[in-house]
Amino acid sequence: MGNRLSKIYTRTGDDGSTGLGDGTRVGKDALRVTAYGTVDEANSTIGLLLATEVPDDIRALLTTVQHQLFDLGGELCIPGHAAIEDADIERLEQQLDRYNDDLPPLKDFILPGGGEAAARCHIARTVVRRAERESVALSRVEDVRPQAVRYLNRLSDLLFVLARVLARASGHGEVLWHHQRRR
């Protein structure tokens, strides 16, 4: 475990640089910083979702996800570090199957909405998708373990399914896209 922060400001980033977990200094706009920063943002959006009323089983699942996202941020912050395992991805897939099994098949696209918790879940989903895109961009120029990208891909799928579950649980229901509205 690294050093704990006893002083929040250090002034070392005033020149536009930041320190990676291995001590290397890079620009704050570096692809690696963007990727792990967006993972942090995704974690925050899940925290915002958890500030609403959600069923206990979903709360427990998303709290576990928050811990894993923190681990993933560390993995991306420390080149060569491994934190996300294949088993983490498999557990996401199991949860995805579990929650999706009770949902009717989709025949239309869904608009973000369906109550406050569902809408916040959709925001989390889109931020996770962005983190995935930024991790892929990073992987084109630096080493990124495939587990990191796969985890983000499955997590965004899981959040989509959970948004559907939350919309139905809230009584608001899913908001369907009306593709023929202009005819």
Image: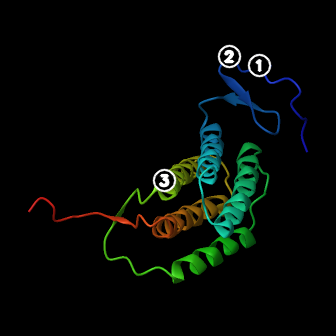
Which of these two is toward me, 183 or 172?
Answer: 172
Mark-to-mark CA distance, 2 and 3: 40 Å
Q: Amino acid at mark 1?
A: Thr
Q: Position of residue 149 (x, y in %)?
A: 61, 59
Q: Residue at x 79, y 52 (%)?
A: 81
Circle 3 residue: 116
Dot 1: few (<14), some (14–19), or many (≥20) neighbours within 10 Å? few
Q: In the picture provided, is 12 more to the left or to the right than 44?
A: right
In the depicted structure, whether residue 150 falls above or below residue 94: above
Pointer 1 or 3: first along the chain: 1
Circle 1 residue: 12
Given the current orientation, which residue lies at the most extreme left position? 183
Mark-to-mark CA distance, 2 and 1: 7 Å
Circle 2 residue: 15
Q: Name the secondary structure under disc 3.
A: helix
Q: Residue at x 42, y 81 (%)?
A: 104
Pointer 2 or 3: first along the chain: 2
Q: Amino acid at mark 2?
A: Asp
Q: Based on the displayed image, in which of its 4 quarters is residue 6 positioned?
A: top right
Q: Amino acid at mark 3?
A: Glu
Point out the image quarter for the C terminus.
bottom left
